[in-house]
Image (cartoon, rainbow, N blue to C red):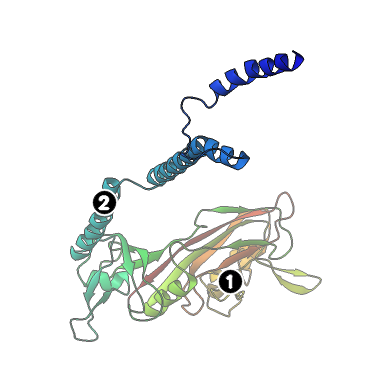
Amino acid sequence: MKLCGVLALVVLVAVPALCQFPPDNWEFPDRRIENNEDLREVQCRHTCKDVKALKRRMREMESRVLALEDAAQAPPTGLLKMLQLEGRIRELEQLLLKSNKPSKLQEVVKPRKDQGTTDTHVSASCAELKDNGYTESGTYTIDPDDLDYGVEPFQVFCDMTSDNDTGITVVGHDSEERMLVNGWETAGSYEKDISYYGASKEQVAALIKASKSCKQFLKYECFSSAIHGRILDLDVTYASWESRQGEKMDYWAGASPGSGKCACGETGTCDKANPRCNCDVNDKRWRADEGYLTDKATLPVSRLNFGDTGHEWEQGYHTLGKLECTGY
């Protein structure tokens, strides 16, 4: 009886379980499931297939995301073509401008007179431009040593009206205003470097060499501030200017190179019969020494140096004009 009861209990438990396995959506192979390996193979037909499909879908989505990122970073084809066309239009505009007659702000090209040919070049100076028929003052491009060698062409101001016979080439700089000197007692302790607009030292030197004459105005107004003096029986030069080569010059504007004087010292017209400069009187009165520097070998002025303005009553003002060149 006990054995029959046990068998009945097993049948009641096992039969319902077998009825629920496998699920309706599972597919069995034609052969019998004989061990655990066969069971795992049956289960993987559904779960592994789903996982593989999911992974494949993820890879497809990753590819689409990368494609969208590339598309977002690259300009649209239409926009790219438009940008290319705009660049081409700008190139054509530049070619058109070059083909037109140059204005006074452009390079002025004229036949070379010294070669007797139709070769063209940028004019060497404003004087040559005026000879070639340009009579309006303004900014022009010049090339003092020709296009084929030397310095690059550069822009200058051409004064075509001050002199009826020729054009004047003018090069400005950053120290043209009247400037105060005060609080500098030691000789040459005040230093002012001069920078010329739109031209290097080599370009300015080429202009001077190609010109018939050049000049630059220089003036020093002084109140108890000397250009020359003596300390312990030694001569001292308080004020000086430096050449384009950086050499201190021993004479002032209006006098001859190497004279060691100002203009009044050469003409004997200095205040109180001072033998060298008006400012050397060095009294409590406003005086001045001024004139033009004309030595082509040393122009233009590259630096100004002053001193003897250390006391509260001592001061001075310096004024340096533009470089002006004529002829060719």
Q: Kindly identify the residue that appears in the image at 49 percent across and 35 percent down.
A: 46
**Which one is nearer the viewer's eye here, 17 or 50?**
17
Circle 2 is placed at which residue position? Answer: 81
Query: What element does badge 1 sit on?
Result: strand
Q: N-terminal of the two: label 1 or label 2? A: 2
Spot occupied by residue 18 in the image (x, y as percentages of width and height): 57, 23
Looking at the image, residue 250 lies above or below residue 83: below
Q: Kindly identify the residue that appears in the image at 27 percent across and 61 percent down.
A: 161
Residue 135, visible in the rendered structure = no
Task: Return the mark for residue 242.
Answer: 1
User: Quarter-wise, where is residue 272 in the image?
Assistant: bottom right
- The amino acid type, in three-letter code, at marker 1 is Glu
Q: Is 96 left or right of 12, judged from the image as shown?
A: left
- The amino acid type, in three-letter code, at marker 2 is Lys
Spot occupied by residue 265 in the image (x, y as percentages of width and height): 58, 72
Looking at the image, residue 146 lies above or below residue 164: below
**Which one is nearer the viewer's eye here, 287 or 91?**
91
Q: Kindly identify the residue that appears in the image at 31 percent across and 45 percent down.
A: 76
Q: Is 163 left or right of 118, judged from the image as shown?
A: right
Task: Return the mark for residue 279.
Answer: none
Residue 177, visible in the rendered structure = yes
Query: What element does badge 2 sit on?
Result: helix
